[in-house]
Image (cartoon, rainbow, N blue to C red):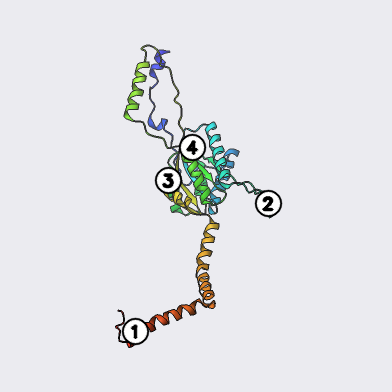
Amino acid sequence: MLRAASRIPTSLPVSLQARTYAISLRPPVVYPRMKDTPRVYAERKTYLYNQYTRLLQGTSTAPLLLFEHSDFSATRLIQLRADIAAAVTKHAGTVAPSLSSPTPSPPPTIPTFTVLRTSLFGVALREMNNFDDATRKEIAKTVTGSLAVLSFPELNPPQLKAVLRLLARSVPPRKPKTPEQLEEEKKAVEAAFVPGRRPKRQKPTPVPDLKLLGALIEGRLFKAEGVRSVAELPTLDALRAQIVGLLSAPAAQLSMVLSEASGGKLKRTLEGFKKSLEEPEGQAQDGQTPPP
């Protein structure tokens, strides 16, 4: 038993320990002896492929945020989705029924946080006609780890800002360990080591991490800085109100001038200006020097 255990390598190669999550856009390999009939996929893969395709198709009207996640448990994911729903509901608010609108406002549509399989997401991205080759390559280059997406029902910058603020508060960025902390952990392992006894395996407490990679908005890829800039924009109704105000401002100013002129204010102003011009001439005729 000891001889067999001694033959087992203590460490595996890096290629076997690390798992890659890169998105591949290369077409599937066609082998010479492959059958002509189309390949039949399992129900789970077919369902996920259709789901990812719908998410990519919806980016023409609604934003799709890309995140890199790690060390998330099922309980923590459930809590994160509940926090997102609470933030969206608090941001939208509720309108009490009144005589003009006796029915209360409908509840807001909650964004969906979904953990993806990068391999199937790459297949769905490769077969999408809404993106050009440059955009596909940029998306594949952006995603370097495990992928999760947050799909919004519509483009609402204030709501997007509220959700980003919640995620930054709920899942703060992970801080790297200092050399002092690493040295303390090494000393603790050395102190717990007993010769001839197998060391007790301690499972570290996972600290979830969530990093914003970018977003797909109206068929375009925005980096993390661009997503935060979009979140600072006002709503579409507010932009329309600003445009209407800019267009109606000259007409309002002209109407105000005409209304003042019709009331005689312009006439009094011109008469006062005429008297101010006649006063220096009258002083010059009396032998006085007009003021400069």
**Closer to the eye: label 1 or 2:** 1
- How far apart are the two marked residues, 4 and 3, measured between alpha carbons? 24 Å
| Cβ atoms under marks 4 and 3 closer than 8 Å | no
**Which mark's residue is nearer the viewer, 4 or 3?**
4
Q: Hey, what amino acid is under mark 2?
A: Ser
Does residue 31 appear in the picture of this structure?
no
Residue beneath disc 1? 283
- Residue depicted at x 54% and y 74%: 259
**Residue 142: assigned label:** 3
At which x and y percent is residue 286? 33, 87
- For the residues labelled 2 and 3, the Cα–Cα distance comes to 49 Å
Label 3: element kind: helix
Where's residue 16, x and y in %? Answer: 41, 31
* Residue that mark 4 sits on: 170
Which quarter of the figure is the N terminus placed in? top left
Sequence-wise, the earlier of marks 3 and 1 is 3
Q: Secondary structure at mark 2?
A: loop
At label 2, counting other C-alpha atoms closer than 10 Å, the crowd grade (few under 14, some 14-19, many 20 or more) is few
Residue carrying label 2? 98
What residue lies at 53% left-to-right and 57% top-to-bottom? 238
Q: Check disc 3: other Cα within 10 Å, few if <14, some if 14-19, many if 20+.
A: some
- Residue at x 55%, y 42% (from the top left corner): 87
Between disc 4 and disc 2, the foreground one is: 2
The residue carrying pointer 4 sits among few (fewer than 14), some (14 to 19) or many (20 or more) residues within 10 Å by Cα, namely some
Which of pointers 4 and 2 lies earlier in the amino acid sequence? Answer: 2
The image shows residue 167, relative to residue 227, as above or below, that is above
Q: Amino acid at mark 4?
A: Ser
Q: Nearer the viewer, mark 3 or mark 1?
A: 1
Q: Residues under labels 3 and 1: Cα distance?
A: 83 Å
